[in-house]
Image: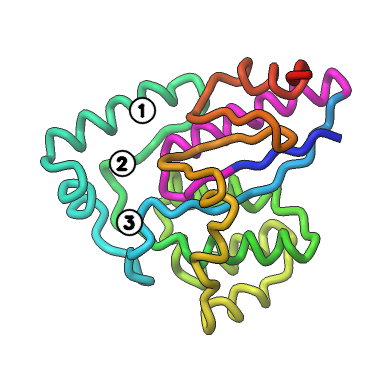
């Protein structure tokens, strides 16, 4: 069975686009009899975001230098996502959340053998489409419950957050400076929100 490792951050719009394209590629691969197993690994675009988050627009303008630069970025991302069924709501986003708890919850559930394949896209959607603060333990608990997974891990990690260094060991080993990244059978890496056809080729025609 092919194993795909995905490195991403929940506040990265390109990662959400990459997820949608991966889902499309997986559907096509399964139709061809290839059923990969997917593992999710954290990356922190802003590891020092306060637990409660911070105002979204102010953060973005500080990071990218001006309101015009932020608008241009949002326009590029929206155009790139136009064929992937994602209607980003950048202009309405109130909070730039911390993703530490969300990543910790996904990692803990995955390590316990739980299937997080439904939870991961739900967290992305909650942030980008539903405008919910995915750093809030109550929000995360509701997403975990809706995915049919045990919620006790949310309260546990809210009390004692997971160590970021331990969470990012996979991304650190790859020396990534951006996401998303897709690694196929630990042999072939694809960086960025590549088209579904590129990802599908990695699944169905891997290098010898």
Work out whether mark 1 precedes mark 2 in sequence or the reverse, and give the earlier one. 1
Label number found at residue 96: 3
Q: Give how far apart the Cα atoms at labels 3 and 2 are.
A: 11 Å
Label number found at residue 54: none
Label number found at residue 90: 2
SS at mark 1? Answer: helix
Tags 1 and 2 touching, CB below 8 Å? yes
Please name the residue shown 16% across and 46% down the image.
61
Of residue 132 and residue 2, the one placed in the foreground of this image is: 2
Label 2: how many Cα within 10 Å (few below 14, some 14–19, many 20+)? some
Q: Does residue 61 belong to the magenta stretch?
A: no
Q: Give how far apart the Cα atoms at labels 1 and 2 are.
A: 9 Å
Work out whether mark 3 precedes mark 2 in sequence or the reverse, and give the earlier one. 2
119 is higher (above) or lower (below) than 197: below
**According to the image, label 1 marks what residue?**
78
Please name the residue shown 53% across and 62% down the image.
102
Tags 3 and 2 touching, CB below 8 Å? no
Q: Position of residue 96 (x, y in %)?
A: 32, 56
Magenta-colored span: 7-33
Please name the residue shown 53% across and 57% down the image.
168
Please name the residue shown 18% across and 54% down the image.
58
Q: Does residue 20 belong to the magenta stretch?
A: yes
Q: Position of residue 84 (x, y in %)?
A: 52, 25
SS at mark 3? Answer: strand
Work out whether mark 3 precedes mark 1 in sequence or the reverse, and give the earlier one. 1
């Amino acid at each position: 069975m092919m194993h795909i490792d995905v490195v991403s951050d929940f506040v990265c719009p390109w990662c959400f686009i990459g997820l949608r394209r991966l889902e499309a590629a997986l559907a096509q691969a399964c139709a061809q009899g290839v059923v990969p197993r997917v593992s999710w690994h954290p990356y922190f675009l802003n590891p020092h975001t306060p637990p409660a988050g911070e105002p979204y627009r102010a953060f973005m303008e500080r990071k990218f230098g001006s309101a015009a630069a932020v608008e241009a970025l949002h326009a590029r991302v929206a155009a790139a996502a136009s064929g992937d069924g994602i209607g980003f709501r950048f202009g309405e986003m109130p909070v730039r959340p911390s993703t530490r708890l969300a990543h910790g919850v996904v990692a803990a559930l995955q390590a316990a053998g739980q299937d997080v394949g439904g939870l991961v896209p739900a967290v992305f959607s909650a942030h980008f489409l539903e405008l919910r603060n995915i750093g809030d333990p109550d929000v995360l608990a509701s997403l975990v419950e809706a995915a049919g997974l045990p919620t006790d891990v949310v309260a546990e990690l809210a009390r004692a957050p997971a160590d970021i260094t331990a969470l990012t060991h996979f991304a650190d080993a790859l020396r990534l400076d951006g996401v998303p990244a897709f690694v196929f059978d630990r042999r072939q890496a694809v960086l960025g929100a590549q088209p579904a056809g590129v990802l599908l080729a990695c699944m169905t025609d891997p290098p010898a």
